[in-house]
Amino acid sequence: MVECASCKTKVFIPSDLLPFASVPCTRCGHPVIMPMQLRQFELRNIIASGGMGTVYRAFDTMLLREVAVKMLKKEVIGDEEVLHSFYREARACAALNHTNIIHIYTFDELDHQPYLVMELADFDSLDAWIERDQRVPELQVLDIGIKVASALDTALKHNLLHRDIKPGNILFNSDGEPKLVDFGLARIAEADEAEHEFIVWGTPYYVAPEKIRREKENFLSDMYSLGGTLYHALTGHVPFEAATVEEVITAHVNTPPTPPNQVVPEISQPTSDALVTAMAKLPASRFQSYDDFIMALTAARSQLLVRQFNMNQTGSEDAGKGWWQR
């Protein structure tokens, strides 16, 4: 019997279950595995699984710490594009040293099956937070924005673009620190025009207009996607909602985003203005550096804290609390 990592139900595991195979939890359906050893790492349970790979919570028996192990599935290791993306993620993250970028500890293979060992950040994700609460409090959104923008600035200083900023790629560790993950689509910021793909990579709900127009992207494209991600967290709505992906993409190109404080009136004007600027249609109309974006978010955060402090000093017992605290 093995305990399900999701709901803690005891699940029977057949003795003939193949290595890395799983069975669904009888209560919640979460995949459950028999703990097994991979080099010095004891794989204990599955955090997440997708079409290309599986992420395990594991324990490093040499350094006595919990880690995450991301392993490609056997059925995709013959796909050169998938392998290239996996190697690119490993090398990109390993080259970066920032508190809010997931740390890579090692890269290895088992029977030609590649795997990454990385920092564990499975306390929460921004995607799950939005789904659970509909809206993330403004102060927390600003904190996340400041830290992730700083992480992207560090990547840019190493000449890297992330190219897939979205709520699902911002995870949180047990201390609540946001961690930017999944550099599988990352590429050199100064890549030649001839190397520029003619495929729109990234998530349609947060994709920059210039990528849709198949123009050369730069760090301002990542900034737009971060702005859209923060917009979603702040308002509970993606910047453009439509019946089809095609309509969403068209809106990114042609339709100005509704300012966040027109969607949710209690959002402060400085926060609303910062996100509108980050999501300007023309890259030249956005903040021209991450420092500028961070300064705008930091100023909005300071003004929000002052406003909350003043309300606490002069208002009723609940007047200074955010909507999420009442």
Image (tube, helix red, strand yellow):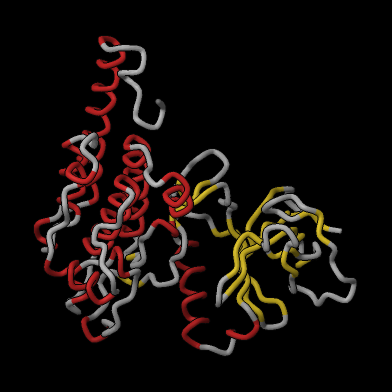
| Residue 41 seen | no
Image location (x, y in percent) of residue 149: 31, 50
Query: Where on the picture, by quarter, is residue 241?
Result: bottom left
**Rendered position, 207 above or below 52:** above
What is the x, y in percent for residue 168? 44, 59
Question: Residue at left 24%, top 50%?
Answer: 290
Residue at (70% x, 54% y) in the render: 5
* Horizontal side, residue 234 vs residue 79: left or right: left
Quadrant holding the N terminus: bottom right
Please identify the quarter of the rendering in which residue 200 is found. Answer: bottom left
Which quadrant does the C terminus fall into?
A: top left
Seen in the picture, residue 225 relative to 230 is either above or below; the reply is below
* Residue ranking furthest to the right: 15
The one of 192 and 7 positioned closer to us in this rendering: 7
**Position in image of residue 105 (x %, y %):** 60, 59
Residue projecting furthest to the top: 314
299, above or below 102, in the image: above
Considering depth in this image, is 140 or 85 the residue closer to the camera? Answer: 140
Which residue is found at the position 68% from the left and 58% from the top? 28
Tell whether 98 sits left or right of 190. Answer: right
Work out whether residue 75 can be spotted: yes
Q: Nearer the viewer, residue 91 or 212?
A: 212
Query: How many labels sit on residues?
Result: 0
User: Where residue 100 sits: x, y (%)?
Assistant: 44, 48
